[in-house]
Amino acid sequence: MDSTYDTNNIFAKILAGEAPCIKVYEDNLTLAFMDIMPQTDGHVLVIPKERAVTIYDLSVEAAQACMLTVQKVGKAVERAMGVTGSTIFQHNGRSAGQTVGHFHFHVLPGPLSGLKGH
Ligand code: 5GP
């Protein structure tokens, strides 16, 4: 996966309303929804509406908006799951583990040690 945006990726389809998602937050620049294969209960993804593959492709405006949405959603997820901490990460490029070619933050309640596979 390079920085060439594939308009057929699944998150593009979600943004276009062509694929379903369980939406938890939306504003003009971002969308947050439940991960379809959660690594722990309450696993949410935050994406920009802008077309960007990796963090290096984001505009300043989209980067700022994603971070603000992560702050809102992260705290909400902590409250909803009754925990006082959260884990936030993202991958850039297939070799780093990125499987969907539209930029996304993973937001999970609790510690990394609580995640499946860790
Ligand atoms: P990555 O490995 O690219 O960092 O993370 C991609 C994430 O997208 C994975 O956690 C995966 O479960 C999630 N995912 C893949 N396809 C879908 C989908 O169709 N809907 C939702 N809600 N999440 C998806």
Image (cartoon, rainbow, N blue to C red):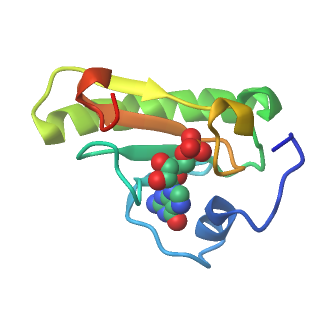
Measured as percent of width and height from the top left, residue 88 is found at: 43, 26
Of 49 and 102, which appears nearest the observer? 102
Measured as percent of width and height from the top left, residue 83 is found at: 13, 27
Measured as percent of width and height from the top left, residue 94 is found at: 72, 39
- Residue located 54% across and 27% down the image: 67
The image shows residue 69, relative to residue 89, as above or below, that is below
On the rendered structure, is 1 left or right of 96?
Answer: right
Q: Quadrant of residue 58?
A: top right
Of 100 and 82, which appears nearest the observer? 100
Farthest left residue in view: 82
On the rendered structure, is 31 left or right of 42?
Answer: right
On the rendered structure, is 53 left or right of 105?
Answer: right
Res. 98 in view:
yes
Quadrant of image for the C terminus: top left
- Residue located 71% across and 62% down the image: 9
The image shows residue 44, relative to residue 95, as above or below, that is below
Farthest right residue in view: 4
Quadrant of image for the N terminus: top right
Measured as percent of width and height from the top left, residue 107 is found at: 40, 35
Count of numbered marks? 0
Farthest bottom residue in view: 18
